[in-house]
Amino acid sequence: MGRLNKNAAMAALKVKGLRRRWFFNTFAVIATLGLACVLVVSALFAWFSYSSVDRQLHAIAKETDAHVATQNADGLDALFEICVAYTETFGEREGIALQFLDANGKVATSSHVALVQQDPVTADVAQTIEQKKACLYIGADSDGDRRIMALSSPVLYQDGQLAGVFRYVFVTTAMDLQIGYIAIISLLTLLLVATVVLITSNYHIRSILVPLGEIIEKAKKITGGSYGIQIETKFDDEIGELADTINEMSIQINQNEKMQSEFISSLSHELRTPLTAITGWSETLLSSNDLTGDTRRGMKIIHREAGRLTEMVLELLDFTRIQDGRMTLNMELVDIRSEFEDVIYMYGSRLAQDGIQVKYQENDVEMPEISCDPMRLRQVFLNILDNAAKHGSDGKQIETAIHYADNTVIVTIRDHGPGIPEDELPLVKKKFYKGSSKARGSGIGLAVCDEIVLMHGGTLTLENAPDGGTLVTIELPATQ
């Protein structure tokens, strides 16, 4: 159950990852482009508005220059008076007011009362007086209370003397507000469009990610060994086709697994009869005194190899029972320490003949009887000891211990061999996996042991010991 929950969580994380990727790769791009469009629209509207006022200022300035030129002023003072009179009758055209400044930049008169209050100090006036050419200014007025757009145009007498300056002033406050409104409206429109896109796209992405998450979860269950389970197909599209493909694969794998289990089971049963006969007759022949020399030695090899094959056949039968769900436990209250010590004594004597010493760390800690299947746990202990002897025989020593802590019986078996490569540690309990080991075996012993321990509610872990060798730890709950 914990494994399934973990798989579901991993599937959910991947789905969330796809949603984040979609958000940043699609929605974020749309939002960025939309914001850029808002800025461009606002900038274009501002440019158009200010350009229109600029054209109006220059058009009125051109009209004024033409009018003044037709007056044929007789002298500089007469020209000055003509300009004053024209300014006072100018009024206000399309929001543009007119100031007339003397040659020093002082206000002589104005078409608007508010523009007479103080002399302008903006850059356009000084530049026009100095350069004697029209200059445009956009920014704060002299008093700093409002933004203006001002065009200062020089009034020159025939000999080039400066009679004064016409200053055309347009207050941009209302226009700036209008530009701001356009920007706000564009931004709100973008937010509305983005919200609609987000809602509709989220619905669309959910229609993809939700069934994809279900497919991932079911696919992981199939990977974990739940062959034959089916994914409910709700769509007649690529996702539905993917689900159908995985369903077909699941059925095919399930059929192959059944055929494999049936074949292994049938073969194992067929092998047991001749192996039993070989083992029995080899024992009979060895018990007699008729065999001597190489003949007796050869018969011992036959007897030993027949026993090894018998153990492999029994492992295969256990494996098929596990695959089919037919393995059961005969539970009873057992003194687990006594059972473990018996296995150590029995198998230790056998390994001593091969020069391998089995050390048992005794302790006096009281250990309660636990509910278990003693035959199956003996099988686990023997299999792990056998692995330690095969893979760690170079160390010539196996250390074993059993102790009790926190309502848990803990069994440790450690060899002093080369250990297990780090990249193979997560795989050693998988069925038929042998890795880089050259030792003989079917590759299913640890898988069977792991399943037996799991059926007891315990755990079986393998790790490399700090100073070399492999450490196997079996933890069994004392209460179930």
Image: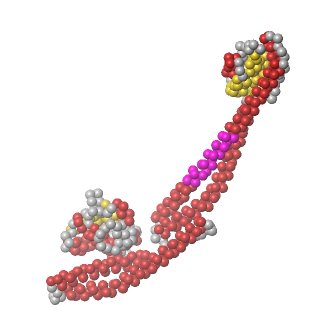
Residue 367 in percent (x, y) is at: 30, 66
Observer-nearest of 150 and 300 = 150
- Determine whether, in the image, residue 319 is placed left or right of residue 68: left
Give yes or no for residue 33 being in the magenta stretch: yes
Q: How is the image coloured?
A: secondary structure
Furthest-front residue in this view = 159
Residue 441 in percent (x, y) is at: 32, 73
Q: Quadrant of residue 127?
A: top right
Residue 257 in percent (x, y) is at: 45, 76
Figure quadrant of the C terminus: bottom left
Q: Quadrant of residue 113?
A: top right
Residue in the picture at 71% in, 13% down: 104
Residue 295 seen in this snapshot = yes
- Judge whether 188 appears above or below 96 on screen: below
- Judge whether 422 appears above or below 349 on screen: above
- Determine whether, in the image, residue 176 is placed left or right of residue 363: right
Residue in the picture at 72% in, 32% down: 50
Q: Main secondary structure of the magenta part?
A: helix
Observer-nearest of 192 and 101 = 101
Give yes or no for residue 283 being in the magenta stretch: no
Residue 136 in percent (x, y) is at: 70, 25
- Per the rendered image, the range of residues in magenta is 20-41
Residue in the picture at 70% in, 35% down: 47
Residue in the picture at 49% in, 63% down: 7
